[in-house]
Image (cartoon, rainbow, N blue to C red):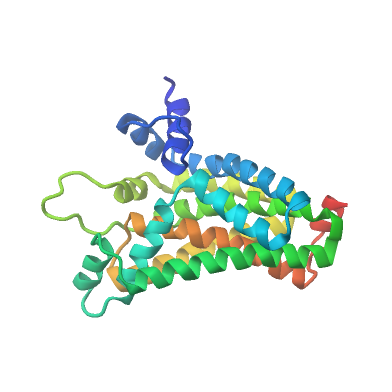
Amino acid sequence: MNSFLLAFKSGFGFLSTIPVGISMEGIDELMKKIYFYPVVGAILGLLIGIVAYIGQLVFPDSVLAALIMGFVYYITGFNHLDGVMDMGDGFMAHGSLEKKVKALKDTTLGTGGVAFGILVLLAFYGSIRAVQDEGFTAFGFNLPLLMFGSMFIAEVSAKQSMLTIAAFGKPLPRPENQAYPGLGEMTINGATRKNFLIGFVFGAVVCYLPFGPIGLISYLAACISALVLLNRSYAHFGGLNGDGIGTANEIGRITALIVIAVMLKLSLNEYLGGLEWTLL
């Protein structure tokens, strides 16, 4: 199979639950062409956006928000949310870097992990509801199109957030008994400046298309959230691992939705020239 097609296929096997199959050869090709992360995010975002569009025509807002969350995790899996909970345990651990890293990597789930997981899920739900509420106030019957575009932008932003944190991060030291890099280290090694820039430009273009500058600003905000998370990962653990990369996915998605909702509330679209003419 062509290396580009193998990397593209492996992107779905690695970042989603779509049963395309995956192999170590495919993972190696994906890491060499990790700019496919936002490309895969765009296709997943289209699927999520279609569900959001149709659902907005049928279901009450609060019910739809929960259904969107369910579909997102159905199609992307819970691996990234698991990373959020592992990071929560590490953040809440007291003591030296070594103790925090041990809490990050152990297989038990503590109070910090549960709390972080709940907060992220509540923030995800709240951000979807905020887009619905502010969008209805601003644009009324164009809300289905708004939800389609918002969920599309959020998923592209989530995947580029992973690429961003990996591109600027350094991996945690390997355990002495581990001879080969884990998936987190492989992701960091693959996220070269060139690969980051290719993915970043692609994501910026496709997020600009639905809503103009509003989409682009929410995308940039998600990337910035990844850098903030990286700073906290350095402070607590002295480096970055796969859990931090997965957490960037969840935080980036939520950040993009929050920024869209805030800009709707502030009615910045009138001045930025994005939403109104696109949706009407």
Quarter holding the N terminus? Answer: top left
Front residue (pair 19, 271): 19
In the figure, 36 relative to 197: above or below? above
Q: Residue at x 50, y 55 (%)?
A: 161
Whole-percent x, y for residue 67 in the image? 61, 53
Specify the farthest residue to the top: 1
In the figure, 44 relative to 175: above or below? above
Image position of 125 (left or right of 185):
right
Specify the farthest residue to the bottom: 94
Whole-percent x, y for residue 96 in the image? 21, 77
Whole-percent x, y for residue 224 in the image? 53, 64
In the figure, 87 relative to 241: above or below? below
Image position of 196 (left or right of 238):
right
Residue 134 seen in this snapshot: yes
Image position of 39 (left or right of 195):
right
Whole-percent x, y for residue 68 in the image? 61, 53
Front residue (pair 13, 117): 117
Q: Give the quadrant of residue 93.
A: bottom left
Q: What is the total number of numbered labels drawn onto the structure image?
A: 0
Residue 216 seen in this snapshot: no
Q: Residue at x 73, y 58 (%)?
A: 213
